[in-house]
Image (cartoon, rainbow, N blue to C red):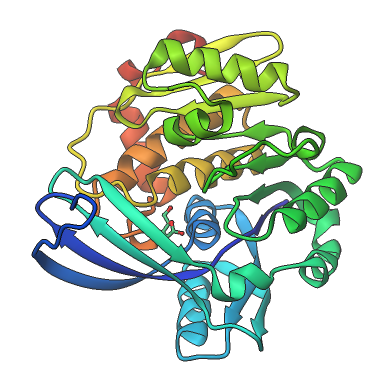
Amino acid sequence: MSVIVLGSINTDFVVKVNRLPIAGETIDGYDLLTAAGGKGANQAVAAARLGAQTHMVGRVGRDRFGPELCDGLQSQGVQIAHVSVDERSPSGTAMIMVDRLGENQIAIVAGANGNVGQSDVENMIELLPYAKVLLMQLEIPLNTVELAGRLARANDIPVILDPAPAPTDIPAWLFACIDIITPNEIEASQLLRFPVHDRETAIEAALALVQMGAGTAIVKLGGQGAVCATADETFFMPAFPIRPVDMVAAGDAFNGAMAAAIAAGLTLKQALVWGAAAGALCATKSGAQAAMPTLDELTSFLEQHRHIVPENLSP
Ligand code: RIB
């Protein structure tokens, strides 16, 4: 059974800086990298490297980046038969700055991702009979996410939504289309309009999202762990101790790993542990897709850090 990822595919231009600039400031960077990215594609690679049969649904432009991005996905084991070439716009792009602490700032130009629409969702239909989960983000049009979410739910396929980048308002239809929502603290603050910055405020946010209709809400707090709330219970997964190098795509690793865990038949609690471990491992390496852990890496990391996983989350 497989994971379907409907989402963005980008080329990332990454500048390494000592510190992130403030508005209006020019600073020196010390390195420039070009790498495959996009929240959708990153999450697809994360799921595939953890052993899930993974189908990417999305668009690239008819430019030199398109074939590179598709080849990159394929080389990581992601099925790309449902990635099409958009004739109207260039491939998606992200400009990223990463500082010495691994913190980042990202600006994206959607390009072809902004044209992912009804025909892509219709193409996806043939994948549904084999799908165990649909994973989406918000770097493609909101109405496409709604269409795909409704279709998946009508076919009893659970839907995970990473609400990144966060919309200014939570659309009324959102909770009718998704099962699990996974904002980080910034996205949770933007969605709920109160500051989310620690375990207590994350619990408040997760419960608010459940009350609004999310079956499960997971608020990711980076180095402070993650909170998960359902209608019945709330639990906390502490962060694994790591020395972060580059936080870009750590959230993507988290989501991709959760989807892979669900596709492998693991419980929600086990999926949360996989997500936290994959996010931590990703943050220890530079880049987005290149930093996604393999199943062997994840398994041995979890063995070494078994003491971090609370008893109520252990299998
Ligand atoms: O989550 C990280 C990703 O966000 C980057 O790869 C970039 O492409 C943007 O989509």
Q: Quadrant of residue 97?
A: bottom left
128 up-or-down from 9: above or below: above
Residue farthest along the front direction in this orientation: 24
Residue farthest along the right direction in this orientation: 154
Q: Quadrant of residue 176?
A: top right
Q: Nearer the viewer, residue 92 or 314?
A: 92
Q: Is residue 235 left or right of residue 301?
A: right
Query: Where is residue 193 shown, x and y percent of the image?
Result: 53, 26
Q: Is residue 80 left or right of residue 33?
A: right
Name which residue lies at 20% across and 49% down. 22
Q: Nearer the viewer, residue 22 or 88?
A: 22
Camera sees residue 176: yes
Query: Where is residue 256 shown, x and y percent of the image?
Result: 53, 47
Camera sees residue 286: no
Name which residue lies at 16% across and 43% down. 101
Quadrant location, ligand no. 1:
bottom left
Query: Where is residue 116 shown, x and y percent of the image?
Result: 69, 69
Name which residue lies at 24% across and 27% down. 241
Name which residue lies at 79% across and 40% down. 177
Q: Nearer the viewer, residue 82 or 187?
A: 187
256 up-or-down from 288: above or below: above
Query: Where is residue 307 shown, x and y percent of the image?
Result: 31, 16
Count all numbered tags in the image, as a single digit. Answer: 0
